[in-house]
Amino acid sequence: MVEIAQESLVATAMYFTNVKSHQEEAAANWKQTFIDVDKELNYQYKRLMDACTTAQLESKLWLVDEVEKLDIPLKQVGLLGGWYANYIVQLLVDRLAVKKVHNFEMDRDAKNISYKFNKRFKERGIYQCYVKNIMFSNFEPNLYDCFINTSCEHMYPMHGFHKLNENTINNPLFVLQSTDERYYDDHINPVWDAEELAEQGKIKKVLYRGTRRLNSGMNRFMVIGYKR
């Protein structure tokens, strides 16, 4: 019997109230993911629970709510350090009509688990995950009309990404999230507020900036906009 933390059960139930397409497949994919990770990748199971919290879902719902209000058509989205992409892919497809989502993640286990969560989208050619360190290798020219990074606190400031890709990407929409939480060792780059996040991300044309206190008690900052 697979044991699922109560917090994850609550968050999963909330998530499925937002699932509009491929509902039966989504439920089957999620169920099988928990079974497979418990059996084959048990050392990842705690991290799996950490990825399936109410706070994680809140931040992704906030993201799609604000992007939806901007009414900017998005066809191909790049996730920068998208982890398991367990919530975000379905929300982008259902709410924003995104056609392709590519996740760039350093962790091979995260890639494999993300394919389990998103099996329905992988099989349809909508979702792909690539093992890539986004701070040390650049991107194909002008392939994406939006980059989403909800893990800014876990990596070097985004201005390094811009410098690396100054000749390969044009002016896509950027959606960035971070926190001021400094307790965790892997939060190597927290910020004090949304203004600092925009500055780090070189976002000159800010369409949205805001702060939200999540269910976990953590402050979450978000900036949406363009470099120019």
Image (cartoon, rainbow, N blue to C red):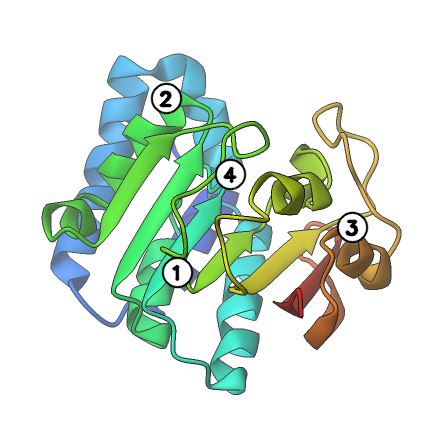
Q: Is residue 167 above or below residue 224?
A: above
- Marks 2, 4: nearer the viewer: 4
* Residue contact between numbered discs 2 and 3, judged by CB atoms under 8 Å: no
Q: Is residue 126 or residue 51 the one in the foreground?
A: 126
Q: CA distance from mark 2 to mark 3?
A: 29 Å
Q: Secondary structure at mark 4?
A: loop
State left or right for residue 161 relative to residue 219: left
**Badge 2 is on which residue?**
109
- Marks 3, 1: nearer the viewer: 3
* Residue contact between numbered discs 2 and 1, judged by CB atoms under 8 Å: no
Q: Is residue 31 above or below residue 124?
A: above
* Residue 105 picture location, percent across and down: 44, 32
Q: Is residue 51 or residue 67 the one in the foreground?
A: 67
Mark sitting earlier along the chain (3/4): 4
Badge 3: how crowded within 10 Å, few (<14), some, or many (20+)?
Answer: some
Identity of the amino acid at label 4? Gly
Q: Which mark is residue 15?
A: 1
Q: CA distance from mark 3 to mark 4?
A: 17 Å
Identity of the amino acid at label 3? Gln
Q: CA distance from mark 1 to mark 4?
A: 21 Å
Q: Is residue 101 or residue 187 the one in the foreground?
A: 101
**Badge 3 is on which residue?**
200
Q: Is residue 6 above or below residue 34?
A: below
Can residue 1 be seen here? The reply is no
Mark sitting earlier along the chain (2/4): 4
Q: CA distance from mark 2 to mark 4?
A: 13 Å
- Marks 2, 1: nearer the viewer: 2
Identity of the amino acid at label 2? Asp
State left or right for residue 120 relative to residue 87: left
- Marks 2, 3: nearer the viewer: 3
**Badge 4 is on which residue?**
81
State left or right for residue 137 relative to residue 140: right
